[in-house]
Image: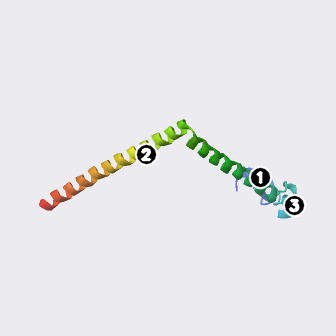
Amino acid sequence: MTPEHSSEKGHFEQGRWVEGELPDAAGSASDEKAVDFGTRIEAVSADISRVIVDVISLGRDIIKSDEGRQHVESQAKKFGDDISATLYHLGNEATKSVEQALEKIKR
């Protein structure tokens, strides 16, 4: 036991050593602010509903506007280009691996 923790009747509380016994669970629970889970669940549910409405609204705006369609088209083209580049790279790596394996077999 370190000098600052010399008492056997002590405990840590919020990162500090406190002399004395631990308070009982009932006492500490009554000291803390009671949580109304029903209210919290309702609030989070309302937030989620608002986000869903916002996402649907964004989707409609993207589809209805020329700028939105152009954005989707450019992202799709970029995605396609990325896939093509990846497949090309994988094909090159596979070809190299096969060539190396054939060279080992020939030796």
**Rounded to the nearest whole Å, what is the CA distance between mark 3 and mark 1?**
29 Å
Q: In this view, does 1 lie above or below 88?
A: below
**Which image quadrant for residue 7?**
bottom right
Residue under circle 2?
79
Q: Earlier in the sequence, mark 3 or mark 1?
A: 3
Position of residue 56 measured from the top left corner of the image (x, y, whole percent): 63, 48
Is residue 54 left or right of 107 when viewed as pictured? right
Position of residue 8 measured from the top left corner of the image (x, y, whole percent): 77, 60
**Which image quadrant for residue 102?**
bottom left
Name the residue located 87 percent from the left edge and 55 percent from the top edge: 31
Instruction: Confirm whether residue 11 shows in the render.
Output: no
Residue under circle 3?
27
Name the residue located 54 percent from the left edge and 39 percent from the top edge: 68
Q: How crowded is mark 3: few (under 14 residues within 10 Å), some or many (20 or more)?
A: few
Query: Looking at this rendering, what residue extends furthest in the top direction?
Result: 67
Instruction: Confirm whether residue 50 shows in the render.
Output: yes
Q: Nearer the viewer, mark 3 or mark 1?
A: 1
Is residue 81 left or right of 56 when viewed as pictured? left
Residue under circle 1?
43
Identify which residue, 15 or 63, lies in the foreground: 63
**Rounded to the nearest whole Å, what is the CA distance between mark 2 and mark 1?**
37 Å
Q: Nearer the viewer, mark 2 or mark 1?
A: 2
Name the residue located 42 percent from the left edge and 43 percent from the top edge: 77
Name the residue located 20 percent from the left edge and 55 percent from the top edge: 100
Query: Looking at this rendering, what residue extends furthest in the left direction?
Result: 107
> Disc 2 residue type?
Phe
Q: Which of marks 2 and 3 is nearer the N terminus?
A: 3
Identify which residue, 31 or 36, lies in the foreground: 36
Is residue 84 left or right of 92 when viewed as pictured? right
Q: How crowded is mark 1: few (under 14 residues within 10 Å), some or many (20 or more)?
A: few
Q: Do the residues labelled 2 and 1 touch (CB within 8 Å)?
A: no
**Secondary structure beneath label 3:** helix
